[in-house]
């Protein structure tokens, strides 16, 4: 799983082959297939693990913040933290989404669930559903923009927007 994570992040899902994963993980082909029937199954397991890791990190990052505004601004600080930690890798879920056919529901489902859970995270903080969706969309766009430009500039600007929007 660790090897697949590094390879999917570094070279993409489609460019990473089963044989490369097996070779770089130093496991026997039979061992791999005992755990995963296919590359798709490995990808789903990777996305499930990434979802759990990412949300644990997010919750840990915001848990000690007092007040709505502090929690939301801190969630944007979390993006800066992840960008520094992962060298502006972007969203693993969106990265893989861009590589799969639209009818691959096996992989699409955990991607959609991750985004639904992120949207629910903001809705759990913000009572106004329209405002929660606004913050969610701002958050998502920050992930994409920061990856594209390898910059936290728009995250910082978004924190300022949040501070003005939420009293």
Image (spheres, grey):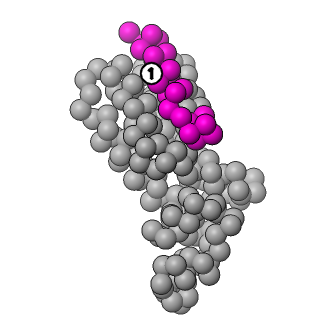
- Which residue: 45% across, 16% down? 160
Assign a secondary structure to mark 1: helix
From the top left corner, tell me how far across and down residue 126 is, in percent: 42, 22
Splitting the image into 4 quarters, where does residue 42 fall? Answer: bottom right
- Image quarter where the C terminus lies is top left
Q: Is residue 54 above or below residue 69?
A: below
Splitting the image into 4 quarters, where does residue 166 fall? Answer: top left
Splitting the image into 4 quarters, where does residue 69 fall? Answer: top left
The reply to whether the magenta stretch includes residue 65 is: no
Look at the magenta stretch and give its main secondary structure: helix
Q: In this view, does 88 lie above or below 101?
A: above
- Which residue: 47% across, 24% down? 156
Please give the range of residues in magenta. 144-167
Q: Is residue 141 above or below residue 23?
A: above
The reply to whether the magenta stretch includes residue 164 is: yes
From the top left corner, tell me how far across and down residue 100 is, in percent: 71, 57
From the top left corner, tell me how far across and down residue 47 is, in percent: 52, 58
* Residue indicated by mark 1: 159
Q: Is residue 96 visible?
A: yes
Q: State how many labels appear.
A: 1
Q: Is residue 132 visible?
A: no
- Which residue: 47% across, 35% down? 120
> In this image, 67 relative to 75: left or right?
left
- Which residue: 43% across, 36% down? 80
> In this image, 82 relative to 151: left or right?
left
Q: In this view, does 31 lie above or below 16?
A: below
| Foreground of the two, 16 or 134 | 16
Sort mark 1 into few (<14), some (14-19) or many (20+) by Cα contacts within 10 Å. many
From the top left corner, tell me how far across and down residue 139 is, in percent: 52, 31
């Amino acid at each position: 799983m660790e090897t697949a994570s590094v390879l999917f992040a570094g070279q993409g899902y489609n460019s990473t082959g089963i044989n490369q994963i097996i070779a770089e993980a130093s496991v026997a082909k039979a061992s791999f297939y005992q755990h995963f029937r296919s590359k798709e199954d490995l990808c789903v397991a990777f996305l499930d693990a990434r979802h759990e890791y990412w949300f644990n990190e997010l919750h840990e990052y915001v848990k000690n913040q007092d007040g709505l505004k502090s929690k939301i601004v801190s969630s944007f600080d979390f993006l800066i933290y992840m960008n520094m930690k992962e060298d502006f890798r972007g969203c693993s879920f969106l990265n893989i989404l861009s590589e799969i056919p639209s009818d691959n529901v096996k992989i699409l489902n955990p991607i959609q669930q991750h985004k639904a859970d992120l949207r629910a995270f903001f809705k759990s903080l913000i009572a106004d559903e329209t405002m929660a969706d606004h913050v969610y969309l701002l958050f998502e766009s920050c992930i994409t923009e920061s990856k594209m430009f390898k910059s936290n500039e728009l995250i910082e600007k978004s924190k300022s927007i949040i501070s003005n929007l939420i009293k």
